[in-house]
Amino acid sequence: MQRRILRPQKLPDAVYRRHALQFFRRIARRIAKGPSVGCAVGERARKLLDRGDVWGTLPTPIEDILASAQIQVAPTSLFDPAHILAYVRSKGGDIAHRIKSAISKVFGLYDAGERVIHIDDTVVESKQNFLKLHETGHHEIPTHRKLFRWFQECEKTLAPDIADPFEREANNFARFALFQGEAYARCAADCALEIKTPMKLAKKFGASIYASAREFARTHRRACVVYVLEPIQYVQGNGAHAVVRRIEASPAFLRQFGRPTDTLITPDHLFGPVLPIGRKMTRPVTLSVTDLDGTDHECVAEAFDTKHNVIILLYPVHALTTTTIILPTGFKQRCTG
């Protein structure tokens, strides 16, 4: 049963707001606890896909999903300076100030009162697809809808300790809808374990390569890990390096190798030779990686530069023995006789 925030007529505004904030903080802590809540979000997304009858339609039909949610995308981009000014003026007061502050940090906004979402149409279409589904998640999940409406009405700023768990839920909603539950994982299982696979599946589902690569590693049955790096930069005297933005590993990889904690890829890092410097892709490079039991494994790593990020895929081939020799990439044995 959904809990409701009741407001007795004689309850002072300050007391009402304090109790409401405590309620939403409790919900945020419950969200952060784990899987049961994630299953509920997935079920919300599943029901929306059922209503839209979009299962199996690829690329994922975003507009049909929005229509099923009875939510609209604003016809003109709120993120255009002229429209920002007009929208802000229409709200007035403290809400206007908060909208202007928020727009500088985000690419999408959900207006609970108007049942409208605003998307930055200057970003690539594949990213817009995810943003639309993310904002639809705020609309479809009842607690989110109450939260957004309450904060808009009370003219309060959504604090990070409340906002972050709700944003993660909306991301999971968008991910489930975009990749149609387990449909992506089934497609990936039938394809080669190589970096070209998430690139092809990104186009097939209407996703960005960034989102596709993360989903590929997150759901793959075999051991593999994806590193998402910020664009490669050059430091005087130190050469090329790239900051690690995200690391997504498959369950099998986590069990065998643990969770990587790298924060920076430099020329002397294990992935140094894999960085696609001056080219779009790096051919498969053979590396040795030690698992949690201390066993060395021959692994293959390859990379792709999307211009926005560098994606590195690593996967083990087999365990190494004392008699195994790894030859450098491109090495050709010469026989004499």
Image (cartoon, rainbow, N blue to C red):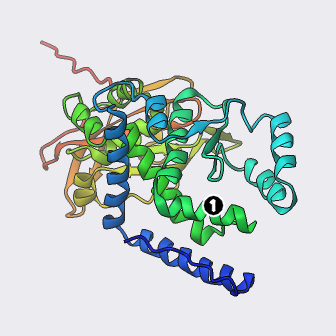
Vertically, is 294 above or below 69?
A: below
Residue 11 percent across, percent down from the top left: 68, 86
Residue visible at 65% across and 53% down? 113
Residue corresponding to mark 1: 149
Which of the pair 254/47 is nearer the observer? 47
* Residue 192 visible in the picture: yes
The C terminus sits in image quarter: top left
The percent coordinates of residue 116 (x first, y second) are: 62, 43
Q: Quadrant of residue 49?
A: top left
**Element type at marker 1?**
helix
> In the displayed structure, would residue 258 be above or below residue 121?
below
Q: Residue at x 48, y 73 (%)?
A: 27
| Residue displayed at 44% across by 28% down | 206
Query: Looking at numbered disc 1 in the image, what kind of residue is underneath it?
Result: Arg
- In the rendered image, the residue lying farthest to the front is 9
Q: Is residue 227 left or right of residue 239?
A: left
Residue 160 picture location, percent across and down: 62, 68
